[in-house]
Structure formats: structure tokens, C-alpha cells
Amino acid sequence: MLYKSVVPSLSQLSYSIFKFLSNHPLLIAPLVLHPISKEVIPISNFRFMSGIPLNEGLTCSIFPGFAQVTEDGNFPLPSAVNPSVLYKAYNMGRNIEEAMYHFIVSYSYREVSIDGLDISDDRDLITIPKEVVMSPLDYYSTSPQTTQVELSINPPFDIISDYLELTRLALYDISHHKKFPLNPEFPGQLEGLDIIHTNYSSFKWSTGANSYFHMGHILFRINAYIDMGWRDRFIPLIEEINTSIELVDGEDIKA
């Protein structure tokens, strides 16, 4: 694990979340397929920033939540937003406080997706009854004759929504937390992890770049109780221990 002298910090937790997710079997196994080409869509790259990706393929972004400042320059109330870290006093005879860390895992995928471009060929999906008869005694009955409807699908939506669900399941994987803990050097106690919401940006396909850049994210909270003191945190990393032997009055003394 990357050595960090300042723990806990948003960057240290970002590295831990990356290590946790990039090693989870649900995000490594070939579970997500392109709905048209049927090719496996793996995560091509990870990064610690938001925004439109520059790389091809599926990008996984990991970054802290942020409380947006209003247009008039005022900071919003913490209760109405999800800031990077929200602190609460917790005085139970110890010098500790409650800390709630908010993080976002966002998936970005670039592919042209416009109405009528990708038509589903799944016969089970697009086949419907050709006729239906409704009556008070029988809610409805259908004829054996069928027809097919045209369904325009959005492949990036399929890909991103599948990865959002896999990420949700991974974050709740207790066994994986034991192997890749999010708090390997946490000076306090990690109390739990809560997923707040998932969100997919379903823009109008006709609004320029929105037909090419597709994004969805999952917002979650890491709850912890941390010490308010600092004197026991900044312990320098010991790289080596040097020893020497001196001869004193005919005896070997190790110093």
C-alpha cells in the first residue's frame, strides 16, 4: 500500500478505495457485455478526478464529494449537501469526533448514441402479442399471434448501469473489506459504509456532446470516529536500523 504520512486524509482514502475496487472479482470478471457487439467491456483506466475522460473505453473515476458554493459566494448548509468530510462532536470521555467521508465512484464511457442508431435484435424482448381481448371476467387474454416492436437502446446506459450495481455490491462485500480494508492505517475506528444514491445522467441525445459522453455515479459515505489530537499520528517511516559494535574493556557491546 502507498505510504502516506498524513492519515486519514482524502487522498489516502482515495488510494484505499482504488485498491479495494480494482481488486474486487465483480469488477474484474467479464460480466458486462456491450448489448450490440456482445464484446466484454472492462474498466480501461482509473483516475482520481471528475470530468469528461480523455481515454477511450470505460473510465472509473474516484473522488471526494463536494459541497458546491452558491453563486453569491455563500457556502451551503452541510445538512443539504454531501461535503467531502462532515465532522460532528462526539465527546464520550475521549478526545475524538465523528467524521463522515463522502466519496463518488463515477463511470464514463464514450460512444455515439442517438435515436435509431442501435436497434435491439432480442426477439424475446421486442416480441409482443398481436391482439389482446379484455373482459371483466378475464383481465386480458392474448392471441397466439405476435408482432415485433422497434426498440432503440442506449448501449452506454447498459454498460454504466451494470457497473454501478456491481460497485454497490462490491462496496457492501464484508469479506473483501477484510482483505483490502479502506482504513489500513486509520487512527480511529471505521464504523461502517453507507451508499447514499446512484445517479445516471440521462441527457437528451440531441444536445451535442451528450450523445457521445455518458456518465453515471454512485455516492457513498464512510463513517468513522477519529482522534482530534495529532502527536501520535506523524510517525516517520523507518527504512533501516543501523547497529555498531564497540570493544569496551575487552567485551563486545552492541549499541
Image: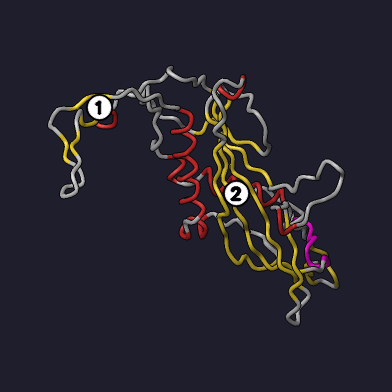
On the rendered image, what quadrant is the C terminus found in? bottom right
Was residue 232 drawn as part of the magenta stretch in this picture? Answer: yes
Q: Is residue 86 above or below residue 151?
A: below
At x 75%, y 48%, the residue is 67
Q: Position of residue 174 (x, y in %)?
A: 48, 60
At x 16%, y 36%, the residue is 142
Quarter of the image holding residue 124? top left
Instruction: Specify the amino acid type for callout 2.
Output: Leu
Image side of residue 43 versus residue 37, left or right:
right
Between 143 and 151, the residue placed more toward the observer is: 143
Total numbered circles: 2
List the single residue furthest toward the left: 144
- Circle 2: element type: strand
Was residue 205 drawn as part of the magenta stretch in this picture? Answer: no
Instruction: Specify the amino acid type for callout 1.
Output: Arg
At x 41%, y 20%, the residue is 118
Query: On the image, numbered disc 1 is attached to which residue?
Result: 123
Q: Position of residue 176 (x, y in %)?
A: 48, 55
Q: Residues within 10 Å of mark 1 (few under 14, many from 20)?
A: few
Of marks 1 and 2, which one's residue comes earlier in the chain? Answer: 1
Q: Give residue 49's mark.
A: none
Give the CA distance from mark 1 to mark 2.
Answer: 36 Å
Q: Position of residue 16 (x, y in %)?
A: 62, 50
Highlighted range, magenta: 230-237
Query: On the image, numbered disc 2 is attached to which residue?
Result: 219
At x 76%, y 54%, the residue is 5
- Circle 1: element type: helix
Image side of residue 80 versus residue 107, left or right:
right
Image side of residue 159 versus residue 76, left or right:
left
Q: Residues within 10 Å of mark 2 (few under 14, many from 20)?
A: many
List the single residue furthest toward the bottom: 93
Q: Position of residue 132 (x, y in %)?
A: 20, 35
